[in-house]
Amino acid sequence: MLVDLQGSWSPLLGRLALSQIPYENLILAPLFVVVVIMGLAIIAAISYFGKWGYLWREWLTTVDHKKIGIMYILIGLVMLFRGFMDALMIRTQQAMAVGPDAPGHLGALHGYLAPYHFGQIYSAHGVIMILLAATPLLVGIMNVIVPLQIGARDMAYPYLNALGLWVTAAAAALVMVSLFVGDFSHNGWFGIAPIFELSYSPGVGVDYWMWVMQLTALGSTLGSINILATVVKMRAPGMTWLRLPIFTWAAVASNIIALTSFPALTVALALIGFDRYLGTHFFTAGLGGNLMLYTNLFWIWGHPEVYFVILPAFGMISEIIPTFSEKPLFGYVTMVLATFGIAGASWAVWLHHFFTMGAGPAVNSFFSVATMLVGIPTGVKVFNWAFTMYRGRLRFETAMLWAVGAVFLLLLGGLTGMMLAIPAINYMVHNSVFVIAHFHQMLLVIVYAIFGAVTYWWPKVFGFKLSEAWGKAVFWLFTAGSVLVFVPMFTLGFMGMTRRLDYVFNTKWQALLDIQVLGIAVYSLSVLAFVGMLYVSIRDHAKNRVSIDPWGTARSLEWMTPSPVPFYNFAVVPHVNARDEWAWRKEHGFTDLRPDHYEDIHMPKNTGIPLILGALMFLLGFGLTWRIWWLCALSLALIIALVIIRSFDSDTGYTIPADEVERMERGHHERARAVDFPAAGVLGGATAYGRAEPAVKGQGAAPLGGGMTSPEGSRL
């Protein structure tokens, strides 16, 4: 039986009413107008240039893992900007609301944000940055790169891959709608039991938070199944487990964590749903529940989630540093073992999030030691990166700067993490901004690695390099902003400033808070520089075009493909001979061989069903949030019907004829030849790989793959 609601409810609109739209809010109302104008401008531009058909055919219905990965990254970048704006508001509010004499603006007693509004921003910032910015960015890069690194033409389940994307997009849309329709949760990104129960939080904010989290959990689970199945079942011939690139190993470990941890979050959120919708009390001590049950369930997911997002970042660093050190990665086997050591330890450390809860010395000691043990495999990684750079031919291009910066931040975040692993220290600083600063150092490792990875793999995906000058400007501005924001935050933590403050009582902290605002301003300049980098790079893309290996020292399999990568990835599935396959082929002179004929390629068909399912899941989440029961029933029925209809569709693929494959490959080689040898143009005698093109009997030859044997007896 549904619980009684505070306030009005109607059969048509549920709890939704005009009063739930904050049209009188002096911050949100102008923002809503800006968003509407921007949306209409985008729609008008697409219509003016006649691109709706193109968008539908090439992007909205695609099952190409590369395009899906790019759309994941776009979602992540949009939500990263939204999360950054929340951070800007948090920092400026705290700097303006210092001491009892601080003036108030826009209806706030101090600063310009009322406590309830500040709580929503604080909660949304955490949810967005963890689940809707970092996770889509990392999943997007894994989507693009993992199939290429293992020699596959697509994901194991292309349809499921698209569905995961649009479920994630539905979650992002739901959290954006909460800006302008109703409120968002005000009890932290992690939820506080039993405050999230209906009797304590009667609004819709907790419902928004709950269904956003559920949708992201579903999308992440679908993605993890797909990536694991892809690596297990679709590796190219010769791609043994100990020849997998480190980034692919990191993706495997990360998605094992996701597949096993997100169900815990799903269960915790489902129990909250029972409390709010059916009147149960799983987490209310006075009514037979246990609030620590939720805390344990959440952090059993929450701390492995931290390693779910950090391990792919480690994999990215492990790809970038060898390329720009012009050396193989030092300690490959130990790096793999360290990756799985971290993944395994991630399950034994969750209780350090509540050392102060009175669990007792034995329990605290166990989790303290377990937390410190994470430092051993992490240290192995740092030493391996250092030894890779040792005596290497180091080139500090933009991607390398981001990778090295990530290593330095990892040292800072790791050392402060070791401090927090000691219960006595944790007890003193647990609720302070010192913990926030430590956590953000670890998240900055991810951000640095992502920017490095985008710079590193951009030319492979789009066929031209990003501007080095602008890229370095982004790096140095972002680094300066990080120093100015988080060094004062560590200091304020030691001085006793607690977190989640909309009003700061101690006027002696004013100078450090102002420095943080200066850091946010520098961060804003880095955002502008990033936009400038994209603009300049796209404007000058013709003169920055690249061939298959734009860095000249890349090592893994993805660098064998044309730049940009064709939709079928590999015209001929390659045969892998070595751990660093592309470096091995360059060393042995096998980079220029081509087959004398091609075979048909089977590829999956585009479909609009995942997009429609994502839209229906958004409507289901919106209906559940506002208790619009007819909308819930209709969208759920349509979801079930579409899934059943899709299950009967056996015509899900198509075949590219061999002659079409050959024509497209010839075009790729001629474009690459024009880049490598501009004086010769497309009629010169050199190939895209730098030599004459010998005809090779049989289907297999480098750089596309193998059925033939080289003079040394190795498979090509």
Image: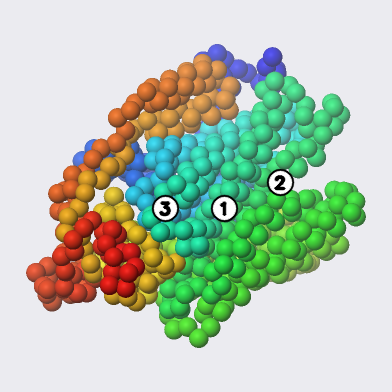
Q: Describe the element under mark 1 as helix, strand or loop.
A: helix
Residue bearing the label numbered 3: 235
x 33%, y 64%: residue: 715
What is the CA distance from the residue labelled 1 to the residue labelled 3?
A: 18 Å
Image depth: mark 2 or mark 1 in front: 1
Image spot of residue 308 (x, y percent): 59, 52
What is the CA distance from the residue labelled 2 to the residue labelled 1?
A: 17 Å
Q: Residue furthest bottom?
A: 391
Image depth: mark 2 or mark 3 in front: 3
Give the amino acid type for the residue marked by disc 1 in the picture: Ser
Q: Are marks 2 and 3 in contact (CB under 8 Å)?
A: no
Give the amino acid type for the residue marked by disc 2 in the picture: Trp
Q: Is residue 221 above or below residue 485?
A: above
Q: Is residue 638 left or right of residue 254?
A: left
Image spot of residue 711 (x, y percent): 27, 72
Q: Is residue 463 above or below residue 642?
A: below
Residue bearing the label numbered 2: 299
Which one is earlier in the sequence, the residue at label 2 or at label 1? 1
